Image (cartoon, grey):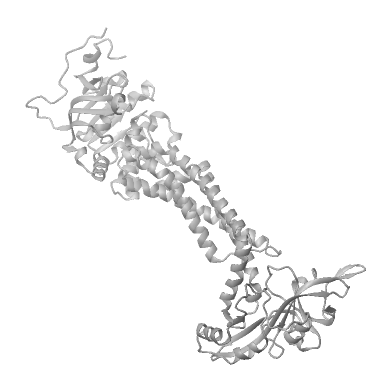
Amino acid sequence: MTTLAPSVSAIAPEGNTRRIAVRCRSVIKNYGVGNATVRALRGVDLDVFEGELLMLVGPSGCGKTTLISVIAGVLDRDEGDCQVYGKDFSALSSGQRTRFRGQTIGFVFQSFNLIPTLTIAENVSVPLLLNGVSRNAALKKAKDMLAVVGLGDRVNEAPNRLSGGQQQRVAISRALVHDPKLIVCDEPTSALDHETGHKVMELLRGVAMSGNRSLIVVTHDNRIFNFADRIAHMDDGVVDKVVGSAKDLYGPNMAAK
Amino acid sequence: MIRYALKMLFGDKARYLGILVGVAFAALLITQQGAIFVGLMERTYSFVSDTPQPDLWVVDPDLEHHSDSKPLVGQKLFRVRGVDGVEWATPMFKAFTKMRLPSGERRGCIVIGVDDNTLVGAPSNLASGAALDLRRADAVLVDEADVNGKLAVKTPDGKRPIRTGDVLELNDHRAIVAGTFKINPSFFWDPVIYTTYTRAISYTPSERKQLSFILVKVRQGQDIAAVADRIERTTGLKAYTESGFKKLTATFILEKTGILINFGIAVILGFGVGTAVAGQTFYNFTMDNLRHFGALKALGTPNKTILAMVLTQALVVGFIGYGLGVGGAAVFGSLIGGTSLAFSLPWQLLVITAGAILIISILAAALSIRKVLVLEPGVVFRG
């Protein structure tokens, strides 16, 4: 039986002085209609602070992916309020939303989603091209970024020639190269072994957190909980608990499992 | 991003080749069948093409094509000569008749008689002899293409080519081969013989009306259409320009035979199969890349960029496929160049094929574009 520690607040308390990167209030999202309606989010309240690594955890189907999709502006909420750096995606036109997302948010996907026919440098350069950077400048910056993650000598290789961990480092480079303020990671270590997953998280913690960026990491992998500043636990479409560490969530014996 | 779209296309070699084969096949079939069709149609009016001297062909108003037999009375020639704006007008005779080869064989032929005095209408490209040789007694010119074939003379050792000096017999009249000419291949099978107008008439059974065409040159500075109109009003005959006369014949062939339908079916088949193969393969290619497009959308790629990427992929593969297909058709054309097969590749046919391939490319892209445009970028978060 897990021993639960007292949770910290999901939202900024009165008198909070930290800047808020993501602010969600009473966010509701349903899929389907009528009797087939699935209530994926039932009124989520959550704040993510600048310079914070927040992990979003919980059982499958609890609404984690739906919540980061709403936060990242790739899915419309049905009700409530959700702002990213003061911008409400639902108040933006489709073009403005796409542009804002391209400038403000970096993505790290579970299955990397690298385009196999492009070199890794070209993959990393995509967000820069979308932000109007010339191809040569974008490739140069992409190569510099790959050097930071330790892949500077493999910039012209195809992604499928790299190991899973290396591919995820490429994906992290792609997420960071255009210097976004918010990074959204969906199960970044689930396809990796323990050691590689640990290295990826070290990289995210060390490189991505620089510059006062915020990270939201959706994960099932309790081996990486220690990298979090806060852990938001979701169940049945709501954030039911936010804790400061893994041991607060599962107790001291479960934290390292 | 367009460059990356092309790398995505060329990088997936199996799909790329599949789409290319579909488009190239369609382009090949459309061009090749179209070129054979155009070649055959050009042959239907090759007789008119081989008689470039006149500005107008004056004929019976009911004439349906240039081989139709609706002769005019001889006086019509003089009436035409009297029309204002006519520089000169000469008679021409054309009819089917029978001839006897030196070896005694009989076969049908087309005899064409040109003006005895001016020889207007005589073939200009002579392989042996000269057009002026027609002025010699009983002289006829025969088609170079037939000397080894339809007009070859049987000998005890086999066959030999017909040659200058050989004597033919047409309607019980002597005809001496004075030379050979080269003309465009004809849609019609029978060998062609040129001689003078007077002699040609004697080579066919006698009829009251024997003037097949009146060839008219319009005086310099005169409007050809206006002169044609005057001829028609004055004589009650029909005056065609060269292109009009060709069109009359071609239209008759198209309407009275199934040639257009037969070739049309082949072209439509090529278009349909090409569209199906290219469309399906391109659709599969896009579906294979759907996750990548989803990721690109999540990363901030606008729909118009995605649209441009997919369209560019389709148009580039269409362009390359077009080049391969048309190139293949041209190679086919050059390979059959020395044979009797009809093949003509005018620029208009290349434009039509390009249009068809453009439609195939857009259709192929359209199948995929909707799927990509409605794709939620959130798909990339689903495992």
What residue appears at the point 28 percent right and 12 percent down from the top-left corner? A254
- A235 or B33: nearer the viewer: B33
At which x and y percent is residue B189? 73, 68
Q: Is residue B339 left or right of residue B331?
A: right
- B178 or A151: nearer the viewer: B178
Furthest-top residue in view? A1
Give above or below for A128 relative to A216.
below
Give above or below for B116 relative to A42.
below
At which x and y percent is residue B284? 47, 40
- Please tell me in which quadrant of the rendered image residue B60 appears: bottom right
What residue appears at the point 40 percent right and 38 percent down from the top-left corner? B290
At which x and y percent is residue B156? 93, 68
What residue appears at the point 60 percent right and 62 percent down from the top-left corner? B35
Residue A203 appearing in the image: no
What residue appears at the point 39 percent right and 38 percent down from the top-left corner? B292
Residue B307 appearing in the image: yes
Which image quadrant: the C terminus of chain B?
A: top left
- B282 or A79: nearer the viewer: A79
Furthest-left residue in view? A15
